[in-house]
Image: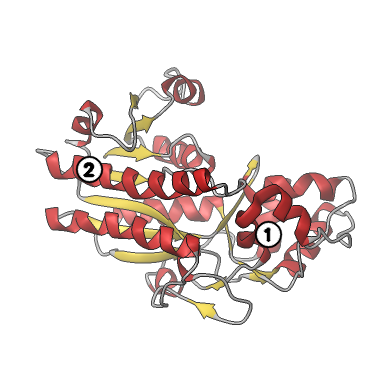
Amino acid sequence: MKIAITGATGLVGTRLVSKLKENNHQIVVFTRNSAKAQKIFPASNFPNLEVVQYTPQESGAWQDRVSGCDAVINLAGEPISERWTAQHKKAILESRQLGTRKIVEAIAKAESKPQVLVSGSAIGYYGTSETATFDETSSPGKDFLAEVCQKWEAEAEAVKEYGVRLVIVRIGIVLANGGGALGKMLTPFQVGAGGPIGTGRQWFSWIHRDDLVNIIIEAINRSDLTGVYNATSPNPVKMNAFCQTLGEVLNRPSWLPVPEFVLELLLGDGAVVVLEGQQVLPKKTQSQNIKYQYPELRSAIREIVK
C-alpha cells in the first residue's frame, strides 16, 4: 500500500513508520521540517519513503501528493505537555482543527482517493473525573481539551462525504522509551526521587506505543473498522499504582510525591491532564478482536525500561 502520514517524526509516528517499512509499504511523510524527517528516515534505510514539505494549516501543492495514496494517517498536532499560554492554546486547537481540515481538503481534491483516513484524537474528549468510567459511547466533556477533541473529530468526519472510510483513534497516555509521559518520569525515579503526582487518586489511562501502532495498522488493513476507537490499555490504573509499579520495576523508591503546584508552575492549565485524569476503557476496540501485546502495566514498563 501507499500510505501518507502526518506527525511521522513524533513519538508515535517514528515507530509507526518503522512498522510500515517492515511490511514493505510505500510511505509519504508530510512534514514541516524536511531536514529533520530526512535525518530520522535516511534514504539508505527507508528506500520506499518520500518526504514532502508542507504547511499543515494552509492549502498548497503538497495536497496533490495525497492522490494515489491508499490510506492517510493524520497524527499531527502541537504538544499539550507545555505551559498553556493563550497563544499555545490557540496553537493546540488550530494545529488539529485546521490541520485536519486541510487533509480532508486534499482528499476531496484527489483524483484517486484513499480508501481510509485514520485520524488521531485523544481521551481528553471525555473530560476528567476520579469516579466516572468512559468508553467510546460516552458523552464529551466540557473543558478545553474536550472542546479541542470535538472540533478535531468534526473536521475528520467531513471525509465521509467523499466515500472515504473514517477511523478516529482516541489516544491515551502513550508509554514508550525515549519520550512521552514515561520519559519525563523516569529520571526522578532513577535517582530515588520518584513518587505519585498530585493526590495519586487520579486515573492514568495508558497504552504501550506498540499497541497503539498496532491499532492504527489494524484500522488501515481492516475495512470493517469504522468510527471511534479508544486506544488505551484495558487496564487503566490510579496514579499511585502506576508510580508504585514503576518504582518496583526500576527497583527504586516511589514514596516522594510531586506536589500539584510544581506541575502547575511548569504546565499552567496543562497540568490538569496529569492531575485529574480519567478512566477510559477500550470496549469497542476489544469487541473488534484487536489484541494487546502489553495489556498489563508491569509487562509494558518492563519492556520499555529493559
Q: Residue furthest bottom?
A: 131
Name the one closer to the observer, 265 or 195: 265
Are the residues flagged by discs 2 and 1 in contact, CB closer than 8 Å?
no
Which residue is labeled 1 in the image? 299
Question: In the shown orientation, is residue 224 left or right of residue 5?
Answer: left
Q: Position of residue 56 (x, y in %)?
A: 34, 36
Q: Quadrant of the N terminus?
A: top left
Name the one closer to the observer, 259 or 176: 259
User: Can the viewer see residue 231?
Assistant: no
Label 1 element class = helix
Which residue is labeled 2 in the image? 70
Point out the tag, 2 or 1, that comes first from the N-terminus. 2
User: Can the viewer see residue 18?
Assistant: yes
Q: Residue at x 46, y 71 (%)?
A: 142
Identify the image's colour scheme: rainbow, by chain, secondary structure or one colour: secondary structure
Q: In the rendered structure, which amino acid carries the disc numbered 2?
A: Asp
Q: Position of residue 240 (x, y in %)?
A: 77, 68
Q: Position of residue 74 (x, y in %)?
A: 35, 46
Q: Residue at x 48, y 70 (%)?
A: 126
Question: In the shown orientation, is residue 175 left or right of residue 285?
Answer: right
Q: Which mark is residue 105?
A: none
Up/down of 201 relative to 273, above or below: below
Q: Viewer-nearest of labels 2 and 1?
A: 2
Label 2 Cα crowd, 10 Å radius (few <14 / some 14-19 / many 20+):
some
Question: In the shown orientation, is residue 99 left or right of residue 295?
Answer: left
Label 2 element class = loop
Q: In the rendered structure, which amino acid carries the disc numbered 1?
A: Ser
Q: CA distance from mark 2 to mark 1?
A: 35 Å
Q: Position of residue 265 (x, y in %)?
A: 73, 50
Up/down of 279 relative to 68, above or below: below
Q: Residue at x 81, y 58 (%)?
A: 258
Up/down of 258 relative to 16, above or below: below
